[in-house]
Image (spheres, helix red, strand yellow):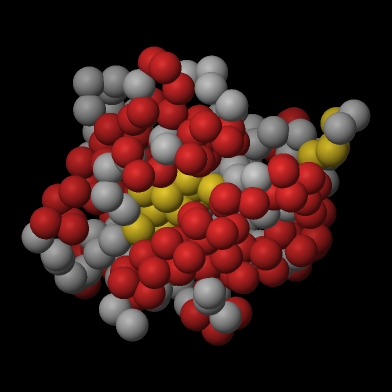
Amino acid sequence: MTDSAGPDVFTAAALARHLGRVIAAPTTADAGAHAALEAAVAAARGCTLCAPHLPRGPRPVLRAGASARILIVGQAPGTKVHETGLPWNDASGDRLRDWTGLDREVFYDPARIAIIPMGFCYPGRGTGGDLPPRPECAPAWHPRLLPHLPELRLVILAGAYAIGAYARPLLGPAFARAPLSDVVAAWETLPPGIMPLPHPSPRNRRWLRDRPWFEDRVVPVLKQRVDHALGR
């Protein structure tokens, strides 16, 4: 599931094509898909690619089952997630679960929800907060993981890094440097099944306060899409 960018790059166009095929002709994960994804997840959890750059050492955090209907692509673990090994196990996760209408039981069920961020390990802190996801991570692992999700119906892109990788390229050159709010507001022009969100971090309270349209208009649609993807 790659395109002209090369076999080692998983592009926004490849993701959109995969979603389009699955939505148009729903499939069911067979034993081969389950085995392939389990092997890829196990390999990712043992990754030490970025070890020299990680102040707390590698601890890749991701969850995925081949039957997952929803993929959540976030940024990288924070300190609490690094300590617990449970993705979105923090205030950001609480807000994301509120936005999606998912309780913890469903949210952490890999048979329904795949959680594969742009960076799997805690990258350390900079002057303004946590550092960006390591740039080596997504190019190394997304091409090995995402093609083994044959039942996807919805991809949630949470935050600037996921949006930069998988939403901006689909919106065209005019959005290459557009403010994040413009990209989120353009969700209706993206291919079906792709939903860009601001990161739900408490640091973004002001962003949300200044843009009430997001929680008034976008979040209800997100909840509808989540319910539809899960068949409920």
> Which residue is painted at 42% across and 17% down in the image?
174
Q: Image quadrant of residue 111?
A: bottom left
- Above/below status of 222 relative to 166: below
Residue 79: percent from the left, percent from the top? 81, 54
Q: Is residue 137 left or right of residue 127?
A: left
Q: Residue at x 76, y 63 (%)?
A: 91
Q: Residue 119 or 55: which is nearer the viewer?
A: 119
| Image: 177 above or below 95 | above
Residue at the spot 39% in from the left edge and 53% down from the top edge = 155
Q: Residue furthest right?
A: 127
Quarter of the C terminus within the rendering: bottom left
Q: Is 134 on the left or on the right of 169, as rendered? A: right
Residue 110 place in picture, x, y as percent: 45, 72
Q: Residue 5, image x and y in percent? A: 29, 20
Q: Is residue 181 in view from this perspective?
A: yes
Give the tally of numbered discs.
0
- Specify the quadrant of the image occupied by residue 45: bottom right
In-front residue for pair 156/146: 156
Q: Nearer the viewer, residue 39 or 230?
A: 230
- Whether 124 is drawn above or below 194: the answer is above
Which residue sits furthest left? 25
Quadrant placement of the N terminus: top left
Does residue 44 appear in this view?
Answer: no
Q: Is residue 178 left or right of residue 150?
A: right
